[in-house]
């Protein structure tokens, strides 16, 4: 990676693996994710409500899962990427106290559109399988983190006397 855009299309090949990401599943993560996405279904924030509906505890909402899948992909691609499509199929629920491990692979590439297959598993099995389409920049943008100090500043005064006026 170079510049501030992260990965470029030229630097990605079909078969590239994304590094795994293990996410501890806390009650706070599950509840906060549901509330942040305005999913007020009680199975995502009320333990007794979830038990009354036949599950052992609250479980993660699909919107929370999609957000974590998106984060996983864009952490790998960098900030210059734009997710154009996300397709998700859920499996077993994510419950508090477990860990979801995300893994991914580049499965397609056409110009600067990259197709990534993502899977997430927990202690009970497969939680999510997603297909993510990401548009990457063609080239890296110049790194703008540090200012260029080699060129004179045209707004600066020409001499010290003018600087003190």
Image (cartoon, rainbow, N blue to C red):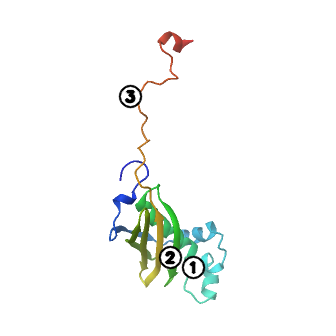
> What is the spatial separation of the Cα atoms under label 3 and label 1, in whole angstroms?
57 Å
Q: Position of residue 100 (x, y in %)?
A: 44, 75
Find disc 1 in the rendering and name its residue: 58
In this view, the mark in front (3 or 1): 3
The residue depicted at 57 percent of the width and 69 percent of the height is 33
Among the two numbered marks 2 and 3 on one chain, the one whose residue lies closer to the N terminus: 2
The residue depicted at 39 percent of the width and 57 percent of the height is 8
> What is the spatial separation of the Cα atoms under label 2 and label 3, in whole angstroms?
54 Å
Q: Position of residue 92 (x, y in %)?
A: 49, 85
Nearer to me, 101 or 56:
101
Q: Which mark is residue 96?
A: 2
Find disc 3 in the rendering and name its residue: 150
The residue depicted at 38 percent of the width and 28 percent of the height is 150
> Within the image, what quadrant is residue 61 found in?
bottom right
* Label 1 secondary element: loop
Q: Furthest-front residue in view?
A: 111
Nearer to me, 104 or 14:
14
Among the two numbered marks 2 and 1 on one chain, the one whose residue lies closer to the N terminus: 1
Nearer to me, 31 or 118:
118
* Label 2 secondary element: loop
Q: Which mark is residue 147?
A: none
Q: Is residue 22 above or below residue 165?
A: below
Q: Please give left or right for residue 52 compared with residue 95 in the image.
A: right
Q: Please give left or right for residue 141 compared with residue 61 in the image.
A: left
- Crowd tier of the residue under label 2, counting other residues whose Cα lies within 10 Å: few below 14, some 14–19, many 20 or above: some
* Label 3 secondary element: loop
- Crowd tier of the residue under label 1, counting other residues whose Cα lies within 10 Å: few below 14, some 14–19, many 20 or above: many
Among the two numbered marks 3 and 1 on one chain, the one whose residue lies closer to the N terminus: 1
Q: Position of residue 99 (x, y in %)?
A: 43, 74
């Amino acid at each position: 990676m170079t510049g501030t855009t992260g990965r470029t299309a030229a630097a990605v090949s079909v078969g590239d693996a994304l590094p795994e990401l293990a996410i501890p599943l806390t009650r706070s993560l599950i509840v906060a994710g549901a509330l942040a996405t305005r999913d007020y279904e009680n199975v995502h924030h009320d333990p007794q409500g979830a038990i009354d509906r036949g599950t052992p505890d609250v479980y993660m909402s699909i919107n929370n899962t999609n957000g974590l899948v998106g984060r996983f992909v864009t952490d790998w691609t960098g900030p210059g990427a734009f997710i154009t499509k996300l397709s998700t199929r859920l499996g077993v629920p994510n419950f508090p106290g477990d860990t979801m491990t995300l893994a991914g692979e580049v499965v397609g590439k056409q110009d600067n559109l990259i197709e990534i297959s993502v899977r997430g598993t927990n202690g009970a099995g497969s939680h999510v399988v997603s297909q993510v389409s990401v548009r990457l920049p063609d080239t890296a943008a110049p790194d703008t983190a540090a200012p260029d100090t080699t060129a004179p500043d045209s707004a600066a005064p020409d001499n010290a006397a003018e600087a003190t006026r």
